[in-house]
Image: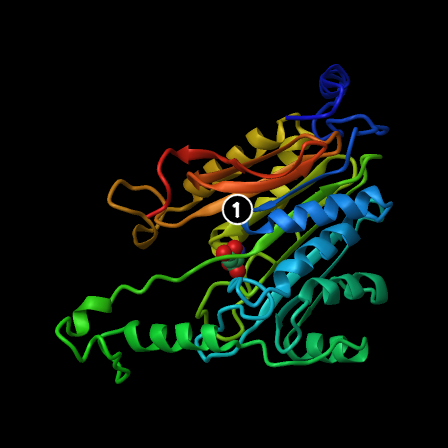
């Protein structure tokens, strides 16, 4: 899975104690590497191309995810993202730059379709890490970002459908409920998830990463997920690698997914094993019954992604799933490791 000199990696791992870097300080990969959620196949390809042209990994990552943010057909990110319960699209994103150790983030940002770019500007133009809501919008405005309505007709219709079908004890009625199926038919309308995380490693071993999302569909207004929280939906350490997550954000926050993965790699775990440790941590921390299925397993999906400084990559999820990767062999989808063999229900 890697273009790294495996002997060099193992030697340095053995030499490393506790949280010392698990990979040598100076590495040269055959090609840059980018890993992302499965909706990012074009994003990883562009990120690798940009890094080959000499772009910094964090800038390459943001350029990659921007393709998805700008795609109105992807209803989990940027324009066309599914809105909150009030029908308003609120976006979350964060970026992290390995060489400088800096990060930037925005949360609950309205009307600007590229929150990852805004997060990059927060990192570059402020002494802060995270701006939220109205303050984030004013910051974006000041930096020349265009404001537009992010709710596409398709997403508006999905929101209305959810609104009508979510409950049997309100006054919203869907056409189907007025028909033969009655009210009970739609009582269980599950929250939909989706996001893009992208971790990038340049040929010189520098790393950068980004996560961007419209968050959990139909969330409460002001709800912030894991995606804009450094250490949760995204994290990187230039001595180690990148780690990030998608799926149920609340579980990723409570497990500190991104930072935990990077820490596991610093202790010597491979990217895939580090991601699987994070999955197991989520299982261990998920205790309340409402979040478990009949077999006692988490009743949601969570996916973790990692790269290390040496260009190795991996991903793991609770339930069977795919991720996107691009390296010297081009862009492709690959199977994640998973704790349970079947896809999520
Ligand atoms: N992690 C995102 C959030 O909770 C959603 C997702 O990845 O599907 O906001």
- How many labels, in total? 1
Q: Residue furthest front?
A: 330
Up/down of 65 relative to 200, above or below: below
Q: Nearer the viewer, residue 120 or 34?
A: 34
Secondary structure beneath label 1: helix
Q: Give the class, few, some or many, for how many residues have Cα within 10 Å of label 1's Cα (few <14, many ≥20).
A: many
Please state the horizontal and vertical placement of residue 181, each as a whole percent of the image.
15, 71
At x 60%, y 64%, the residue is 71
**Is residue 234 visible in this depiction of the protein?**
no
Please state the horizontal and vertical placement of residue 193, each as a whole percent of the image.
46, 58
* Residue occupied by mark 1: 255
Q: Is mark 1 within 8 Å of ligand 1?
A: no
If the image is split into quadrants, where does the N terminus sit? top right
Please state the horizontal and vertical placement of residue 89, each as a whole percent of the image.
54, 74
Please state the horizontal and vertical placement of residue 159, each as a whole percent of the image.
41, 74
Q: Residue furthest left?
A: 180
Up/down of 112 relative to 277, above or below: below
At x 84%, y 49%, the residue is 55
């Amino acid at each position: 899975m890697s273009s790294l000199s495996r002997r060099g990696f193992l030697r340095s791992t053995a030499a490393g104690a506790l949280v010392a870097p698990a990979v040598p300080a100076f590495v040269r990969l055959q090609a840059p590497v980018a890993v992302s959620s499965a909706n990012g196949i074009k994003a990883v390809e562009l990120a690798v191309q940009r890094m080959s042209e000499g772009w910094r990994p964090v800038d390459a990552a943001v350029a990659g995810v921007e393709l998805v943010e700008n795609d109105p057909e992807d209803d989990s990110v940027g324009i066309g993202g599914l809105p909150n319960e009030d029908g308003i699209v609120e976006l979350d994103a964060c970026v992290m730059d390995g060489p400088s150790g800096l990060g930037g983030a925005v949360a609950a940002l309205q009307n600007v379709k590229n929150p990852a770019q805004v997060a990059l500007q927060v990192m570059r133009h402020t002494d802060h890490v995270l701006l939220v809501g109205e303050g984030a919008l004013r910051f974006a405005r000041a930096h020349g970002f265009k404001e537009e309505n992010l709710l596409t007709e398709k997403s508006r219709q999905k929101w209305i459908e959810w609104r009508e079908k979510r409950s049997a004890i309100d006054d919203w009625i869907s056409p189907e409920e007025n028909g033969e199926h009655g009210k009970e038919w739609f009582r269980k309308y599950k929250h939909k998830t989706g996001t893009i995380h992208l971790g990038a490693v340049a040929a010189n071993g520098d790393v950068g990463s980004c996560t961007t999302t419209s968050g959990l569909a139909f969330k409460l207004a002001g709800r912030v997920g894991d995606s804009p929280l450094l250490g949760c939906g995204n994290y990187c350490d230039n001595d180690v690698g990148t780690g990030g997550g998608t799926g149920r954000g609340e579980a990723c926050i409570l497990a500190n997914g991104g930072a935990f993965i990077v820490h596991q790699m610093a202790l010597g775990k491979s990217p895939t094993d580090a991601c699987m440790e994070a999955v197991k941590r989520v299982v261990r921390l998920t205790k309340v019954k409402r979040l478990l299925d009949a077999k006692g397993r988490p009743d949601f999906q969570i996916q973790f992604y990692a790269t290390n400084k040496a260009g190795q990559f991996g991903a793991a999820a609770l339930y069977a799933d795919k991720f996107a990767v691009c390296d010297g062999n081009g862009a492709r989808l690959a199977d994640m490791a998973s704790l349970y063999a079947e896809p999520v229900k």
